Image (cartoon, helix red, strand yellow):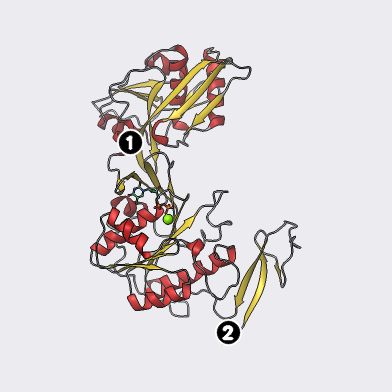
């Protein structure tokens, strides 16, 4: 039998004591000790077949068969890097109520419909509630097993009985291992449960999805204890009052983290958005108004066309307001400063609001020209033709800098029927896209000459 001992670990510096202390003796931080059971001789170790317990030339290690399994959802498969790897542990994080349970129940339904067994374990809902949700999502396959349980040891026993191909744990914060006395959701429980699930995944070559709620600080389960233990980390993002959701890969041991999947929440679950650009531009089509312009951005490896809107109006109170949604606040302040200094557009006594339609968040500088154009369009009350899209990074001297993946952006604009693209002077401007006319601009002033 292995010897068990309780120890207290500091969350920040890892200092170990045998009793709880309010302040860490190592780093001086307050309230950072968590209890953990130390079990000798059971450190997590890969027991995969072919590994053995001695070093092997990598060419002699037995290859993994049936490399990837499709989840039945093209968007999710792409974010996973081409499907689910057997024996992998995937963490799905996101704000409460964003649709994590819905997404994974749908995946469970699809895998179940493909003739495999799936065990959906919920620590948050009863089996009846799961059934209710399954009915709403029109899932009815006998291969999908629902189970309401929070004790991980009991769950492991059931996994051995049911022998599923996919296990879903909803959520890690409700699970507990009976060896540890602290409450479910505490750091030590989350760590212990994740380690046990990791072991289970590797031993049985079982793919496991684990849901993790994001805490107020934006981290999964407090410290990022889980993130580096699991194989894949996905985040499910979106505004709760908007219907679209983005699935983003943050870490992937089996593929790139560059991909995103786009979904729309409907009354009957999540639908994959196959053509995201036209989805976000629905309302833009055929509308000529001041203060709006379309920008091609790159999300993951895909181009996405989004509309940036702006409103500039005189300030009625002392200090002018600057408000942004979807673009960086400080970056917008900088763009306004460049407009004032380089083009003499005095917005000093105006309120300025910038919004990206559909709740998309843009974090690349290639949208600078779009923000500048939208602000100027509203300030001057001049319309930018709705067949025009713009891109370019703005320098402090008013010059336009090259953007990455220009070719992709222009092709996406052409595909959606745009007629004019205003781009920075740079290498690699495609000359074979006949549907759009490309205008090169060296400075912001040049770009505006083409726009207004
Ligand atoms: P849920 O998957 O329970 O969120 P999470 O597990 O991330 O906490 O989703 C909750 C929200 O999704 C809820 O506000 C209702 C909405 N919803 C729909 O709009 N349509 C649906 O078909 C379902 C099942 C949920
Ligand atoms: Mg849930």
Residue 449 spot, x, y in % from top left: 40, 13
Residue shown at 42% from the left, 32% from the top: 403
For disc 2, the marked residue is 2
Q: Is any part of residue 3 visible from this angle?
A: yes
Q: Relative to 271, does residue 364 appear above or below in the rendering?
A: above
Q: Is residue 192 left or right of residue 254?
A: right
Q: Nearer the viewer, residue 247 or 100?
A: 100
Mark 2 Cβ inside 8 Å of ligand 2: no
Q: Nearer the viewer, residue 408 or 15?
A: 15
When asked about the image quadrant of residue 84, the answer is bottom left
Mark 1 Cβ inside 8 Å of ligand 1: no
For disc 1, the marked residue is 408
Residue 370 spot, x, y in % from top left: 43, 25
Q: Secondary structure at mark 1?
A: helix
Q: Relative to 76, does residue 440 appear above or below in the rendering?
A: above
Q: Mark 1 against mark 2, which lies toward the viewer? A: 2
Q: Secondary structure at mark 2?
A: loop
């Amino acid at each position: 039998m292995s010897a068990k001992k309780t120890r207290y670990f500091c969350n920040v510096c890892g200092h170990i004591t045998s009793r709880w202390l309010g302040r860490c003796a190592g780093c001086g931080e307050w309230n950072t000790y968590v209890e953990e059971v130390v079990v000798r001789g059971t450190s997590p170790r890969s027991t995969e077949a072919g590994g053995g317990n001695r070093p092997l030339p990598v060419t002699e290690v037995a290859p993994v068969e049936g490399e990837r399994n499709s989840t039945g959802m093209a968007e999710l498969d792409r974010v996973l890097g081409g499907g689910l790897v057997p024996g992998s542990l995937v963490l799905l994080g996101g704000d409460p109520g964003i649709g994590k349970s819905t997404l994974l129940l749908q995946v469970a339904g699809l895998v179940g419909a493909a003739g495999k067994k799936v065990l959906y374990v919920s620590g948050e809902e009863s089996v009846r509630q799961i059934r209710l949700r399954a009915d709403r999502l029109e899932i009815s396959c006998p291969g999908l097993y629902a189970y309401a349980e929070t004790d991980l040891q009991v769950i492991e026993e059931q996994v051995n009985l049911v022998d599923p191909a996919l296990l879903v744990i909803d959520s890690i914060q409700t699970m507990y291992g009976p060896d540890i006395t602290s409450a479910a959701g505490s750091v030590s429980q989350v760590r212990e449960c994740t380690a046990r699930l990791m072991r289970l995944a590797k031993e049985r070559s079982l793919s496991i999805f684990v849901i993790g709620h994001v805490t107020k600080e934006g981290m999964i389960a407090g410290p990022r204890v889980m993130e580096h233990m699991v194989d894949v980390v996905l985040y499910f993002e979106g505004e709760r009052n908007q219907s679209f959701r983005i699935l983003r890969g943050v870490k992937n041991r089996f593929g790139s983290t560059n991909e995103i999947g786009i979904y729309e929440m409907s009354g009957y679950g999540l639908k994959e958005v196959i053509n995201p650009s036209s989805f976000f531009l629905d309302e833009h089509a055929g509308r000529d108004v001041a203060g709006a312009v379309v920008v091609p951005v790159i999300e993951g490896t895909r181009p996405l066309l989004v509309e940036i809107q702006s409103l500039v109006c005189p300030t009625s109170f002392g200090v002018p307001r600057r408000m942004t949604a979807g673009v960086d606040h400080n970056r917008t302040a900088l763009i306004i400063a460049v407009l004032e200094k380089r083009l003499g557009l005095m917005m000093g006594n105006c309120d300025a609001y910038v919004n990206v339609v559909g709740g998309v968040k843009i974090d690349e500088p290639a949208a600078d020209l779009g923000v500048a154009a939208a602000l100027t369009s509203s300030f001057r009350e001049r319309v930018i033709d709705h067949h025009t899209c713009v891109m370019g990074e703005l320098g402090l001297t008013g010059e336009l800098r090259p953007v990455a993946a220009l070719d992709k952006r222009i092709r996406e604009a052409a595909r959606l029927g745009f007629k004019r693209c205003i781009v920075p002077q740079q290498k690699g401007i495609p000359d074979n896209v006949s549907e759009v006319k490309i205008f090169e601009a060296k400075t912001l002033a040049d770009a505006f000459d083409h726009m207004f």
